[in-house]
Image (cartoon, rainbow, N blue to C red):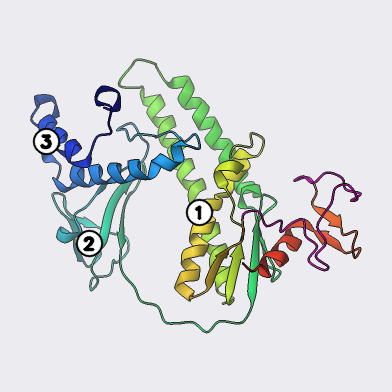
Amino acid sequence: YYKLFGKSVSQLALQKRFTKIKKRKRYKWLKDINAQVPKQASKDFDKARKHSFEKYKNGYHTSYKSKKDLIQGFYANYERLIIGKKVVDIQSIGEVKTSQQLPRNKKPSNPRVTFDGRHWWISVGFEESFEAQELTDESIGVDVGLKELFVASNGTKERNINKDAKVKKLLKRKKSAQRDMSRRFTKGVKIQSAGYEKAKTEHLRLSRKITNIRNNHIHQATAKLVKTKPMRIVVEDLSISNLLKNKKLSKAFSFQKLNFFFQCLSYKCEKYGIEYVKADKWFASSKICSCCGVKYDHSVQPEGQWSLKIREWCCVGCNSHHDRDVNASINLSRWVK
Protein backbone atom coordinates (compact mmCIF):
# COMPACT_ATOMS: atom_id res chain seq x y z
CA TYR A 1 0.00 0.00 0.00
CA TYR A 2 2.81 2.40 0.93
CA LYS A 3 4.68 1.58 -2.31
CA LEU A 4 1.56 2.31 -4.40
CA PHE A 5 0.23 5.44 -2.70
CA GLY A 6 3.23 6.79 -0.74
CA LYS A 7 1.39 6.71 2.57
CA SER A 8 0.41 4.19 5.24
CA VAL A 9 -3.08 2.73 5.17
CA SER A 10 -5.43 4.24 7.77
CA GLN A 11 -7.70 2.27 10.06
CA LEU A 12 -10.82 3.60 8.32
CA ALA A 13 -9.47 2.81 4.82
CA LEU A 14 -8.60 -0.71 5.96
CA GLN A 15 -12.14 -1.29 7.26
CA LYS A 16 -13.68 0.01 4.01
CA ARG A 17 -11.37 -2.24 1.99
CA PHE A 18 -12.39 -5.24 4.08
CA THR A 19 -16.10 -4.48 3.50
CA LYS A 20 -15.51 -4.57 -0.28
CA ILE A 21 -13.54 -7.82 -0.09
CA LYS A 22 -16.40 -9.52 1.79
CA LYS A 23 -18.64 -9.07 -1.26
CA ARG A 24 -16.41 -11.24 -3.46
CA LYS A 25 -17.51 -14.84 -4.00
CA ARG A 26 -14.23 -16.41 -2.89
CA TYR A 27 -14.49 -14.58 0.46
CA LYS A 28 -18.12 -15.45 1.23
CA TRP A 29 -17.02 -17.17 4.43
CA LEU A 30 -16.06 -13.76 5.88
CA LYS A 31 -19.76 -12.95 6.25
CA ASP A 32 -20.02 -15.66 8.93
CA ILE A 33 -17.52 -13.77 11.12
CA ASN A 34 -18.89 -11.28 13.63
CA ALA A 35 -18.43 -7.68 12.40
CA GLN A 36 -16.58 -6.69 15.60
CA VAL A 37 -13.72 -9.14 14.92
CA PRO A 38 -12.29 -7.52 11.72
CA LYS A 39 -13.03 -4.03 13.11
CA GLN A 40 -10.92 -4.74 16.21
CA ALA A 41 -8.23 -6.43 14.07
CA SER A 42 -7.85 -3.21 12.04
CA LYS A 43 -7.63 -1.20 15.29
CA ASP A 44 -4.93 -3.56 16.60
CA PHE A 45 -3.00 -3.27 13.33
CA ASP A 46 -3.19 0.55 13.38
CA LYS A 47 -2.01 0.66 17.00
CA ALA A 48 0.87 -1.77 16.33
CA ARG A 49 1.93 0.19 13.23
CA LYS A 50 2.10 3.48 15.16
CA HIS A 51 4.11 1.87 17.98
CA SER A 52 6.54 0.23 15.55
CA PHE A 53 8.00 3.43 14.02
CA GLU A 54 10.58 3.81 16.80
CA LYS A 55 11.44 0.11 16.59
CA TYR A 56 12.22 0.36 12.85
CA LYS A 57 15.17 2.63 13.70
CA ASN A 58 16.72 -0.28 15.62
CA GLY A 59 16.39 -2.73 12.74
CA TYR A 60 12.96 -4.09 13.70
CA HIS A 61 10.89 -5.71 10.94
CA THR A 62 7.12 -6.17 11.02
CA SER A 63 5.90 -9.76 11.22
CA TYR A 64 2.42 -9.85 9.70
CA LYS A 65 -0.33 -12.22 10.81
CA SER A 66 -1.09 -15.20 8.63
CA LYS A 67 -3.63 -18.02 8.59
CA LYS A 68 -0.59 -20.32 8.59
CA ASP A 69 0.54 -19.04 12.01
CA LEU A 70 0.71 -21.75 14.65
CA ILE A 71 -1.21 -19.64 17.19
CA GLN A 72 -4.47 -18.03 16.08
CA GLY A 73 -6.83 -15.68 17.92
CA PHE A 74 -9.64 -13.15 17.66
CA TYR A 75 -11.43 -10.44 19.61
CA ALA A 76 -14.76 -11.13 21.34
CA ASN A 77 -17.23 -8.27 21.85
CA TYR A 78 -17.21 -7.53 25.61
CA GLU A 79 -20.71 -5.95 25.46
CA ARG A 80 -22.19 -9.24 24.26
CA LEU A 81 -20.06 -11.54 26.42
CA ILE A 82 -22.29 -13.33 28.93
CA ILE A 83 -20.58 -15.23 31.75
CA GLY A 84 -22.47 -18.09 33.37
CA LYS A 85 -21.59 -20.96 35.69
CA LYS A 86 -18.42 -22.39 34.11
CA VAL A 87 -19.74 -21.28 30.74
CA VAL A 88 -19.30 -18.22 28.55
CA ASP A 89 -21.62 -17.03 25.78
CA ILE A 90 -19.60 -15.48 22.93
CA GLN A 91 -21.37 -13.46 20.24
CA SER A 92 -21.87 -15.39 16.94
CA ILE A 93 -20.45 -18.56 18.55
CA GLY A 94 -22.78 -19.35 21.44
CA GLU A 95 -22.20 -21.03 24.78
CA VAL A 96 -18.77 -22.54 25.44
CA LYS A 97 -17.80 -24.43 28.59
CA THR A 98 -14.81 -23.14 30.58
CA SER A 99 -12.48 -25.14 32.83
CA GLN A 100 -12.48 -22.34 35.44
CA GLN A 101 -15.18 -20.03 36.74
CA LEU A 102 -14.86 -16.45 35.48
CA PRO A 103 -16.07 -13.58 37.74
CA ARG A 104 -19.77 -12.99 37.12
CA ASN A 105 -20.29 -9.72 39.01
CA LYS A 106 -17.56 -7.74 37.23
CA LYS A 107 -17.47 -5.99 33.87
CA PRO A 108 -15.21 -7.82 31.36
CA SER A 109 -12.63 -5.88 29.36
CA ASN A 110 -10.89 -6.67 26.04
CA PRO A 111 -11.80 -10.40 25.74
CA ARG A 112 -9.58 -12.42 23.39
CA VAL A 113 -10.00 -16.00 22.23
CA THR A 114 -6.84 -17.87 21.16
CA PHE A 115 -6.05 -21.34 19.87
CA ASP A 116 -2.58 -22.68 20.65
CA GLY A 117 -2.80 -25.74 18.41
CA ARG A 118 -4.39 -27.93 21.04
CA HIS A 119 -6.48 -25.87 23.44
CA TRP A 120 -8.81 -22.90 23.13
CA TRP A 121 -8.27 -20.07 25.64
CA ILE A 122 -10.25 -16.99 26.56
CA SER A 123 -8.43 -14.14 28.29
CA VAL A 124 -10.54 -11.43 29.89
CA GLY A 125 -9.53 -8.37 31.90
CA PHE A 126 -11.33 -7.46 35.13
CA GLU A 127 -10.75 -4.41 37.31
CA GLU A 128 -9.75 -5.31 40.87
CA SER A 129 -8.98 -3.31 43.99
CA PHE A 130 -6.24 -4.37 46.40
CA GLU A 131 -5.76 -3.52 50.05
CA ALA A 132 -2.66 -1.53 50.97
CA GLN A 133 0.13 -3.78 52.31
CA GLU A 134 2.39 -3.08 55.26
CA LEU A 135 5.89 -2.77 53.82
CA THR A 136 9.31 -2.99 55.46
CA ASP A 137 11.92 -0.23 55.10
CA GLU A 138 14.12 -2.55 53.02
CA SER A 139 15.38 -1.66 49.53
CA ILE A 140 16.14 -4.72 47.39
CA GLY A 141 18.45 -4.65 44.37
CA VAL A 142 17.84 -7.28 41.68
CA ASP A 143 20.57 -8.27 39.22
CA VAL A 144 19.45 -10.48 36.32
CA GLY A 145 21.76 -12.69 34.28
CA LEU A 146 22.40 -16.00 32.55
CA LYS A 147 24.00 -17.98 35.36
CA GLU A 148 20.92 -17.42 37.53
CA LEU A 149 17.64 -15.80 36.58
CA PHE A 150 18.36 -13.17 39.23
CA VAL A 151 20.37 -12.49 42.37
CA ALA A 152 18.80 -10.19 44.99
CA SER A 153 20.59 -8.13 47.64
CA ASN A 154 18.59 -9.85 50.41
CA GLY A 155 20.31 -13.15 49.56
CA THR A 156 17.57 -14.57 47.32
CA LYS A 157 18.81 -16.41 44.24
CA GLU A 158 16.64 -17.93 41.54
CA ARG A 159 18.04 -20.61 39.26
CA ASN A 160 18.08 -20.50 35.47
CA ILE A 161 15.24 -22.89 34.59
CA ASN A 162 16.78 -23.53 31.15
CA LYS A 163 19.62 -25.46 32.82
CA ASP A 164 17.19 -28.03 34.25
CA ALA A 165 17.43 -31.52 32.74
CA LYS A 166 13.68 -31.54 31.98
CA VAL A 167 13.83 -28.33 29.90
CA LYS A 168 17.00 -29.48 28.10
CA LYS A 169 15.28 -32.74 27.16
CA LEU A 170 12.20 -30.88 25.87
CA LEU A 171 14.38 -28.51 23.81
CA LYS A 172 16.13 -31.50 22.24
CA ARG A 173 12.77 -33.07 21.33
CA LYS A 174 11.53 -29.73 19.94
CA LYS A 175 14.62 -29.46 17.72
CA SER A 176 14.00 -33.00 16.46
CA ALA A 177 10.35 -32.15 15.65
CA GLN A 178 11.50 -29.01 13.82
CA ARG A 179 13.90 -31.06 11.67
CA ASP A 180 11.08 -33.52 10.98
CA MET A 181 8.84 -30.64 9.85
CA SER A 182 11.52 -29.29 7.48
CA ARG A 183 12.17 -32.74 6.03
CA ARG A 184 8.47 -33.40 5.35
CA PHE A 185 7.65 -29.91 4.00
CA THR A 186 6.92 -29.80 0.24
CA LYS A 187 7.54 -26.43 -1.39
CA GLY A 188 4.77 -25.03 -3.60
CA VAL A 189 2.10 -27.37 -2.19
CA LYS A 190 -0.89 -25.85 -0.39
CA ILE A 191 -1.97 -28.96 1.49
CA GLN A 192 0.95 -30.65 3.21
CA SER A 193 1.18 -34.35 4.07
CA ALA A 194 -0.28 -35.95 7.21
CA GLY A 195 3.29 -36.59 8.40
CA TYR A 196 4.10 -32.88 8.18
CA GLU A 197 0.94 -31.92 10.10
CA LYS A 198 1.76 -34.50 12.77
CA ALA A 199 5.31 -33.11 13.17
CA LYS A 200 3.91 -29.56 13.25
CA THR A 201 1.45 -30.47 16.02
CA GLU A 202 4.24 -32.11 18.05
CA HIS A 203 6.51 -29.08 17.57
CA LEU A 204 3.72 -26.75 18.72
CA ARG A 205 2.91 -28.94 21.74
CA LEU A 206 6.55 -28.94 22.87
CA SER A 207 6.92 -25.18 22.25
CA ARG A 208 3.85 -24.51 24.37
CA LYS A 209 5.07 -26.80 27.16
CA ILE A 210 8.52 -25.11 27.30
CA THR A 211 6.93 -21.63 27.30
CA ASN A 212 4.56 -22.62 30.12
CA ILE A 213 7.46 -23.96 32.23
CA ARG A 214 9.47 -20.74 31.74
CA ASN A 215 6.49 -18.46 32.41
CA ASN A 216 5.47 -20.40 35.51
CA HIS A 217 9.03 -20.22 36.87
CA ILE A 218 9.14 -16.43 36.36
CA HIS A 219 5.72 -15.95 37.98
CA GLN A 220 6.77 -17.98 41.04
CA ALA A 221 10.16 -16.22 41.31
CA THR A 222 8.69 -12.69 41.09
CA ALA A 223 5.87 -13.55 43.52
CA LYS A 224 8.42 -14.88 46.01
CA LEU A 225 10.38 -11.62 45.72
CA VAL A 226 7.47 -9.19 46.21
CA LYS A 227 6.02 -11.23 49.10
CA THR A 228 9.01 -10.13 51.21
CA LYS A 229 7.21 -6.72 51.01
CA PRO A 230 10.21 -4.40 50.69
CA MET A 231 9.81 -0.63 50.44
CA ARG A 232 11.24 -0.66 46.92
CA ILE A 233 12.83 -2.94 44.32
CA VAL A 234 15.60 -1.61 42.08
CA VAL A 235 16.47 -3.26 38.75
CA GLU A 236 18.87 -2.49 35.90
CA ASP A 237 17.57 -0.54 32.91
CA LEU A 238 18.67 -3.14 30.37
CA SER A 239 18.33 -2.80 26.61
CA ILE A 240 17.13 -6.32 25.78
CA SER A 241 17.29 -5.63 22.02
CA ASN A 242 21.02 -4.86 22.34
CA LEU A 243 21.61 -8.04 24.36
CA LEU A 244 19.95 -10.06 21.60
CA LYS A 245 22.40 -8.64 19.06
CA ASN A 246 25.19 -10.65 20.70
CA LYS A 247 25.44 -13.68 18.39
CA LYS A 248 27.01 -15.93 21.01
CA LEU A 249 24.54 -15.14 23.81
CA SER A 250 21.35 -14.10 21.98
CA LYS A 251 19.74 -17.54 22.29
CA ALA A 252 20.54 -17.79 26.01
CA PHE A 253 19.10 -14.31 26.65
CA SER A 254 15.93 -15.07 24.66
CA PHE A 255 15.45 -18.27 26.70
CA GLN A 256 15.62 -16.23 29.94
CA LYS A 257 12.61 -14.10 28.87
CA LEU A 258 13.93 -11.02 30.71
CA ASN A 259 11.32 -8.69 29.21
CA PHE A 260 8.59 -10.92 30.63
CA PHE A 261 10.43 -11.06 33.98
CA PHE A 262 10.53 -7.24 34.27
CA GLN A 263 6.90 -7.01 33.17
CA CYS A 264 5.76 -9.48 35.87
CA LEU A 265 7.89 -7.85 38.56
CA SER A 266 6.58 -4.38 37.63
CA TYR A 267 2.87 -5.19 37.87
CA LYS A 268 3.31 -7.24 41.06
CA CYS A 269 5.15 -4.34 42.68
CA GLU A 270 2.28 -2.06 41.69
CA LYS A 271 -0.21 -4.52 43.19
CA TYR A 272 1.61 -4.55 46.56
CA GLY A 273 2.34 -0.80 46.54
CA ILE A 274 6.11 -1.39 46.24
CA GLU A 275 8.16 1.27 44.46
CA TYR A 276 9.58 -0.22 41.25
CA VAL A 277 12.76 1.61 40.24
CA LYS A 278 14.96 1.33 37.15
CA ALA A 279 18.55 2.37 37.82
CA ASP A 280 20.35 4.56 35.30
CA LYS A 281 21.38 2.67 32.16
CA TRP A 282 25.03 3.68 32.64
CA PHE A 283 25.22 2.79 36.35
CA ALA A 284 28.15 0.32 36.63
CA SER A 285 26.59 -1.83 39.36
CA SER A 286 28.92 -4.82 38.79
CA LYS A 287 32.15 -2.78 38.62
CA ILE A 288 31.78 -0.68 41.79
CA CYS A 289 32.98 -2.14 45.10
CA SER A 290 29.96 -2.33 47.44
CA CYS A 291 32.30 -2.00 50.45
CA CYS A 292 34.44 1.06 49.65
CA GLY A 293 33.02 2.44 46.38
CA VAL A 294 36.21 2.05 44.30
CA LYS A 295 35.46 1.30 40.64
CA TYR A 296 37.03 -1.63 38.80
CA ASP A 297 40.03 -0.44 36.77
CA HIS A 298 41.44 -3.01 34.34
CA SER A 299 44.83 -1.25 34.29
CA VAL A 300 45.47 -2.12 37.96
CA GLN A 301 43.19 -5.15 38.45
CA PRO A 302 44.89 -8.58 38.24
CA GLU A 303 41.76 -9.96 36.47
CA GLY A 304 42.49 -7.72 33.46
CA GLN A 305 39.98 -6.33 30.95
CA TRP A 306 36.38 -6.39 32.22
CA SER A 307 34.18 -8.98 30.50
CA LEU A 308 31.28 -11.38 31.16
CA LYS A 309 33.82 -14.12 31.91
CA ILE A 310 34.82 -12.38 35.16
CA ARG A 311 32.45 -13.82 37.78
CA GLU A 312 34.52 -12.87 40.85
CA TRP A 313 37.02 -10.09 41.54
CA CYS A 314 39.02 -8.47 44.35
CA CYS A 315 38.87 -4.74 45.07
CA VAL A 316 42.32 -3.09 45.00
CA GLY A 317 41.03 -0.38 47.36
CA CYS A 318 39.92 -2.47 50.35
CA ASN A 319 40.92 -6.01 49.26
CA SER A 320 37.27 -7.19 49.45
CA HIS A 321 36.41 -10.30 47.43
CA HIS A 322 33.23 -9.95 45.37
CA ASP A 323 30.84 -12.23 43.55
CA ARG A 324 29.96 -10.17 40.49
CA ASP A 325 26.16 -10.65 40.70
CA VAL A 326 25.85 -10.28 44.49
CA ASN A 327 27.96 -7.11 44.38
CA ALA A 328 25.76 -5.69 41.59
CA SER A 329 22.55 -6.40 43.53
CA ILE A 330 23.91 -4.65 46.67
CA ASN A 331 24.89 -1.58 44.64
CA LEU A 332 21.46 -1.51 42.99
CA SER A 333 19.72 -1.63 46.38
CA ARG A 334 21.59 1.57 47.36
CA TRP A 335 21.03 3.38 44.08
CA VAL A 336 19.59 6.92 44.22
CA LYS A 337 18.82 9.33 41.39
Q: Is residue 305 visible?
A: yes
Q: Measure how far apart labels 3 and 1 are at the Cα level.
A: 37 Å
Residue 91, percent from left and from top = 14, 53
- The quadrant the N terminus occupies is top left
Q: Which residue is mark 1?
A: 260
Q: Residue furthest top?
A: 188
In the rendered image of this protein, does residue 276 appear above or below residue 302? below
Within 10 Å of disc 2 (Cα), the crowding (few <14, some 14-19, many 20+) is: some
Q: Which residue is mark 3?
A: 19
Element type at mark 1: helix
Element type at mark 2: strand
| 25 horizontally vs 227: left or right | left
| 33 horizontally vs 236: left or right | left
* Residue 192: image tag: none
Q: Residue furthest bottom?
A: 134
Element type at mark 3: helix
Residue 286 covered by magenta stretch: yes
Residue 306, percent from left and from top = 79, 46
**Tag 1: residue type?**
Phe
Within 10 Å of disc 1 (Cα), the crowding (few <14, some 14-19, many 20+) is: some
Bounds of the magenta span? 281-309
Q: Which residue is mark 2?
A: 87
